[in-house]
Image: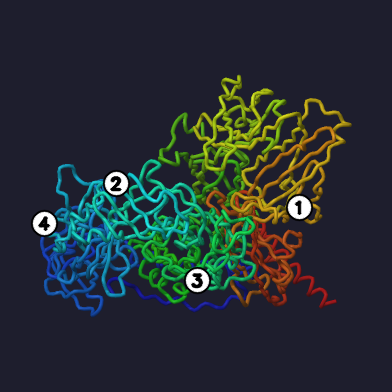
Amino acid sequence: ADSAIAARSPAMRASPAADPRASPRGGTAPRRSRRLRRARATALAACLACCLPTAGAVAVLESLTPGGLPVGTDLLVTLAGSGFEPAASASGPFSTCRFTAAATGEEFSTTAEVAPSAASARCGVPGSAPAGAYTVTLVGPTGTAAADYFEALTVWLYDAAAVSLDKVRPPGGPRAGGTVITLEGSGFAAYGTDGADLCCVFAGANSCSAPATLLTTLTSGTTRASCIVPAWAAGGAESLSVEITLSGTAGGAELPVTASGEAFFYYDEPTVLAVSPAAGAAAGGYPVTVTGSGFGALVRAFGPEGKSYPRLRLGSASTDAVAHAGPPSFLNDTMAVFDEAPFAPAGAREAGLALNGVDFVDGAGPDAAVAVSGAYAPVLVSVLFSADATTLVVRFDSQPTDRASLPGIFDCAAVLDDDTAAAVRGDSAADVPSGCFWEDDSTLVAQLTQRSTARSGVRAGVRAGVLRAKSCSGKSGETEASCPANAAATLPIPVDAACVGGACPPVVAQLNAPVRISRCAGESIRLDAGESYGVGARPPRFQWGAHPASDNAAALNNYFASDAVVEAAGRPVLRVPAALLASGSAWRFLLRVDNFLGARSRVFEWAVERDALEIPTLYIEGPFELEVNPSEPLLIAGVARLAACFPQGPGDRNSTEVDFRWSHEQTAATETGEVFTGAEAEAFDLGLGAGATKSVLQLGSFSLRPAVTYTLALAASMRGRPDLSARARVKVRARRQEIQPILSGGDRRVSALRPLIVSAADSYDPNVDPRIGGAESLDFAWTVSRRADTPDGLPETAVDLNSLGVDAAKSSLRVEPDSLSAGSYTVTVTVTQPRSGSAASASVAVEVVEGDTVSVSLKGLPWVKYNAVWNRKTERFVLDARVDLPSLAAVQEGQFSYEWRALEVVGDTPKDAQRLDLTDDAVTSTGARTRNLAFRSGALTAGATYRFELFASSPLYARPAFAAVQLSTNRNPFGGEIQVSPETGGVAVDTQFTVRATGWKDDAEDLPLEYAFEYLRLGAASASSLAGSGLFEALAERSRSNEAGVYLPAGNLTVAVAVADSFGAEARASTAVVVGEPPALTLSEVNAVIFRAQLAISEGDPFRAAQLVAAVAEVETAEEEEGA
């Protein structure tokens, strides 16, 4: 044919042994045979590269607007892209727009108007085409323009007569605008990219006035959408016409809009002056009268219908945490009567009135508030996914609950009903960490696993009788009537706004791969999308493609659409076979990611080119973009794989050495993206020198500056051929950590006769090396306030430190004797970093007592976070105390006795009933009666809050000394598991296994995570009990890469992963793997394996080398025993 050549390769005699590069067992085929195979492969690749057509200038369609148009409209469809080649005559290239019906395949054509830039074309809509979806492309004598990303571009032709707007709710709102209105009607649909064509049209405009969001269709078939109304224009009409269009990006006088005549009415906000009664029960149910002005605005505009909208609330919290009552039984311009008050938490609660049921105005002053007392049964108000869709957030009303007396991480089934608790875990293995914790007194957070079955639209709920009001906690004699428990309740997880804050955040596709490969025909490309984010709890779906301008795009896209790739769409790593790359030199790979909530990422593109030489294939493990804490050391590993056709063999070892070199290419401000140059760039230079000549880059703590992004590059070249060099890059963002104000002493009791000394000298900036970022580089501001000796809720009274002669700007506060009268005080320090302006505060409670007494203080806790479990003694949790006396003789110190208490805190209430047994040797190594308290690893619960109290008594003083400190332990990573492939059939020495940690999540401030893979020659049931025992053998160096290629020994193994956050909190998961015995190895095969191990060392992968040597050593020993 004119555009293809058919060729048949000559018959080739089977090689007596495989290429050592392809199989770790390898073989020792004669050199002549290896050279012959390489020559034939090179000749075939050269033939393909020479004779097959290459991708030259390709016409590519990238986008289409609008995505929807009425049938028979005169409006045009605009296609954007590149390479359209406008013609001088109608018969030239790309002169026709082809519309193909998706349902029937019927084709319609119109004339294309191509812009001179060759980057856009306009197409008329075929007048005879019926309603439906149509793919659109450009056609001409030279060919057809291809779609850029995955699917062909689609336009929907719809029947405009079937689109109608029937209702706008609420029908009015305050002049300030911002009211979210819901439009109801028929035929609503969201066309175009991200539904951009669905728009509200206000005041008869000829364009989109406000983007609209398509909501779920009601069971009646009514379609719905929402949008936000603008502020009233001064001097404008009191009402604003509201219509909807499905073709908002079209614009112009012919914009198809509904003609409903619906309008939105603007009104002046009402004024709430008073409410009666002045007091009421928390459970509500009593009649309430609200007085003020401007209450009848909607009644005047809409008649009796306007009376159906007003709502009352007591309290000014967000609408999803406060109950509403309404409509009123009586309403005029100055009075609204509600027959039943809504429930509200105890306290002074302002009356809030919303004339439209949405936009509340709160009353001001004591006459506009109700003194609410008592308690009511906690009420479930919402069930949503977290903003990153990794947890389920269960919210109760704003009355604080008793948290079911559950601290830390606990079994979700203690609060959630059986169906919801089961949905949270799904069918995850028993050792997959997951649980629930209280974020605050009204918010329960459930950690989702990657096998969770929670979905939008599914109901979730709580079991009955587990929660009461916090005010009831610890009170005896309370009846069910005065402190009722919650009822069983369920709510659907919303479909329209499933995440906290509304719509869930977008999925962002990320891809990591080499940017260049060698000229060798046998090179494959590994694409890793594992660092895509916004994917949520469950594994996302990865969709791969090749850009039309990519070499061999058709064959690549056929491969990406094959059953094998589609069935593995949940796996983030894909290897493109060498056979599909042999005929090309430049590729543009595409990635799109869908999450379990239906959100879809924009397309991510990664370019790879083929080099003219046998360069190594180089990649950096882990994500292409990385975010780290400046206070943490940084370790980044690169791996170089020798080119498939690079001369190698047991006799060529010296030529296979790879030299690595790291360099610092660029520095930029993270927030603005501004690239530093000149002296400014030199100030941020990392000074990578001799230590940057290995495959692994190690930077010490504080090497990176906060709020700065560093671009680092790794070059790998063959030692004997420096011209054979590859390059890879990684971006590292150093986040800004919060200032750590450290107060020594903790809460305490002091004598009014002695000075009060509180030190913040141990405070530090975690973004800066302690040698330059300690207390001397920080600014301090102290305040002291006296807490009222009356019931809670009254403000504290500030102490005038200046009048007491106190310097409140030092790192330590000293208040002289007799300056403070007896009472309870709060001492607060605010620590500021003057260079960055960042600041943080810390407080201690101080009880000042009459008469002389001794004081005891606790050493400040300097770490940002403390873990409940640790593996090194330097990480253990110890509380150090000292008795504060001006001159304490040894004989006096010996007369002091000590008593420690450790209480779990639920909310802000220490629970005496949940006291730790400090005399238990499994809990502490010191017991409860020593001056210092040292805990054992695992004695505390991850995610729990504790209050540690110390009492020091002496016969020399009538009152014991007292000090206390409160601490929350770090939560561990959660929700993930470990996968090993192949799952079956793997053989020692022969099979390279892939181990991958999937679905692991943690709090944002605890990221990034690090992964350590290991194995044990025991079943999985024993693995968890042996964690940290030293019996596990490492498979790969701990790194931020969640995947490793490993060789495993034969036998029944447990393969495990230890996942640690940036503060050291660790979680584990394991799986059982059966590895088969390999066939007997010949001496030449053993040598081939050893050579592969040597290559692994050269390529920067010593663990792979050790695994190969260990595996072959076991096989050798077994054969020697049999031979004996």
Q: Residues within 10 Å of mark 1 (few under 14, many from 20)?
A: some
Instruction: Name which of mark 2 and mark 4 comes first in the sequence.
Output: 4
Instruction: Name which of mark 1 and mark 4 comes first in the sequence.
Output: 4
According to the picture, the residue beneath numbered tag 2 turns out to be: 292
Look at label 1 and name its amino acid: Arg
Look at label 3 and name its amino acid: Thr
Spatial CA span between label 2 and label 1: 63 Å
Instruction: Name which of mark 3 and mark 1 comes first in the sequence.
Output: 3
Residue 33 quadrant: bottom right
According to the picture, the residue beneath numbered tag 4 turns out to be: 253
Instruction: Name which of mark 3 and mark 4 comes first in the sequence.
Output: 4
According to the picture, the residue beneath numbered tag 1 turns out to be: 936
Q: Residues within 10 Å of mark 3 (few under 14, many from 20)?
A: some
Q: Going by the image, does 506 lie left or right of 1106?
A: left
Give yes or no for contact between labels 3 and 1 (Cβ–Cβ under 8 Å): no
Spatial CA span between label 3 and label 1: 37 Å
Say which quadrant the N terminus sits in: bottom left
Residue 124 quadrant: bottom left
**How is the model colour-coded?**
rainbow
Image location (x, y in percent) of residue 390? 50, 60
Spatial CA span between label 1 and label 4: 76 Å
Residue 739 quadrant: top right
Instruction: Name which of mark 2 and mark 1 comes first in the sequence.
Output: 2
